[in-house]
Image (cartoon, rainbow, N blue to C red):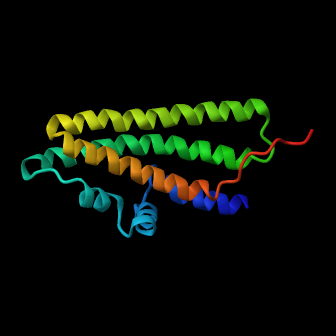
């Protein structure tokens, strides 16, 4: 069970981590959406010709920062996978506080880049960016959460 959990989680979080190869990310997005993430975004977000270069420059900057947070997610996921069977209440609380903090950072990153995208484009493009990033994040989280074992209270 732990091995299966780690494999599924690695596929999910590989999209957020610095990797030697982009293969895991491509495989994940192709499995979920039939194409890689940038193609999904390009298909949905429609900046004008005048906005396009600035948008993609900002988007690449955003992706770099998102991947840093993803590396932290992998570490938390590995910690959970290693200890979810025997986690103490104190460990569970500390782990959850870190997860909540990381989720806030991810939400803040998307909100920050919403503002940056809006500044170089308009409200439509910025909203499209916000919507697709949240959609992708939610869809992939749901795929993984369906496979993640819930924490059970350890018998004493």
Give left or right: position of 143 versus 48.
right
Count the marks.
0
Whole-percent x, y for residue 84 in the image? 74, 46
Residue 146, above or below 91: below
Q: Return the residue nearer the eye: 14 or 19.
A: 14
Q: Return the residue nearer the eye: 125 or 97.
A: 125
User: At 68% across and 45% down in the image, what residue appears?
Assistant: 80
Residue 116, above or below 5: above
Residue 40, above or below 68: below
The quarter of the displayed image where residue 142 is located: bottom right
Residue 59, above or below 20: above
Task: Say if residue 60 shows up in the picture.
Answer: no
The quarter of the displayed image where residue 21 is located: bottom left
Whole-percent x, y for residue 109 in the image? 37, 35
Look at the image and tell me in which quarter the N terminus lies. Answer: bottom right
Whole-percent x, y for residue 11 in the image? 52, 60
Give left or right: position of 56 versus 23.
left
User: At 64% across and 59% down in the image, what residue appears?
Assistant: 147
The quarter of the displayed image where residue 33 is located: bottom left
In the image, farthest residue toward the left: 50
User: At 71% across and 49% down in the image, what residue appears?
Assistant: 150
In the image, farthest residue toward the right: 156
User: At 58% across and 37% down in the image, what residue appears?
Assistant: 99
Look at the image and tell me in which quarter the C terminus lies. Answer: top right
Give left or right: position of 85 versus 120.
right
Task: Say if residue 29 shows up in the picture.
Answer: yes
């Amino acid at each position: 069970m732990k091995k299966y959990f780690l494999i599924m989680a690695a596929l999910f979080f590989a999209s957020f981590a610095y990797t030697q190869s982009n293969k895991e990310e491509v495989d994940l997005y192709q499995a979920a959406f039939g194409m890689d993430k940038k193609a999904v975004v390009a298909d949905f977000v429609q900046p004008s010709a005048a906005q396009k270069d600035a948008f993609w420059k900002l988007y690449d900057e955003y992706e770099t920062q998102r991947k840093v947070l993803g590396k932290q997610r992998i570490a938390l996921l590995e910690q959970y996978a290693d200890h979810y069977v025997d986690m103490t209440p104190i460990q569970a609380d500390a782990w959850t506080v870190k997860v909540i903090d990381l989720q806030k950072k991810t939400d803040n990153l998307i909100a920050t880049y919403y503002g940056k995208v809006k500044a170089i484009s308009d409200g439509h493009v910025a909203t499209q960016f916000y919507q697709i990033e949240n959609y992708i994040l939610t869809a992939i989280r749901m795929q993984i959460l369906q496979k993640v074992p819930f924490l059970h209270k350890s018998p004493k």
